[in-house]
Amino acid sequence: MKTTYGVGVKVLADFHPYVVTGDFNGDGVEDFAVAVVDRSRKTRNSAVVVFNGPLGSDTALHPFVVPGIDLAHQSLFFGPPASKPYRLSIGYFKSDYIVEILPKGNSYRLKEADCH
């Protein structure tokens, strides 16, 4: 079983490309993001939905939605093996280009980033 890729970077055994949890907005409460795929269309039309925790609170009722993206060969990322501060992001595997989903007040904003 492969335990690393590249030089000294550990493989995440429990990695799920379309679900991620973590404290995205730095309030000390776990949040989560999911990808939603519309399989009824021939195009790969997807959306990413970010929910702030705790569930049952007013903030959880107003998720941040990133609509109309093609998630083919992309994934949601948060936490290791990235370096701190962790950022929720969407990106292609083995690519330096990502879209970060950054906290902004009670919501989020998108920021395109080139990791060179």
Image (tube, helix red, strand yellow):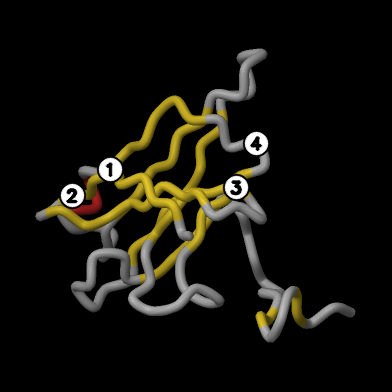
Of the image marks 1 and 4, the number of the one nearer the N terminus: 1
Asked if disc 2 and disc 3 are in contact, CB closer than 8 Å, the reply is: no
Displayed quadrant of residue 14? bottom right
Residue 52 vertical position relative to residue 13 in the rendered view, above or below: above
Label 2 or label 3, whichever lies nearer to me, is 3
Q: Amino acid at mark 4?
A: Ala
Asked if disc 2 and disc 1 are in contact, CB closer than 8 Å, the reply is: yes
| Residue tagged 2 | 107
| Residue tagged 4 | 72
Task: Determine the residue positioned at 33% across, 37% down.
Answer: 65
- How far is disc 2 from disc 3 in space, using C-alphas? 24 Å
Q: In the displayed structure, does residue 89 sit left or right of residue 9?
A: left
Task: Determine the residue positioned at 60% across, 45% down.
Answer: 74
Asked if disc 4 and disc 3 are in contact, CB closer than 8 Å, the reply is: no
Q: Nearer the viewer, residue 36 or 84?
A: 84
Of the image marks 1 and 3, the number of the one nearer the N terminus: 1
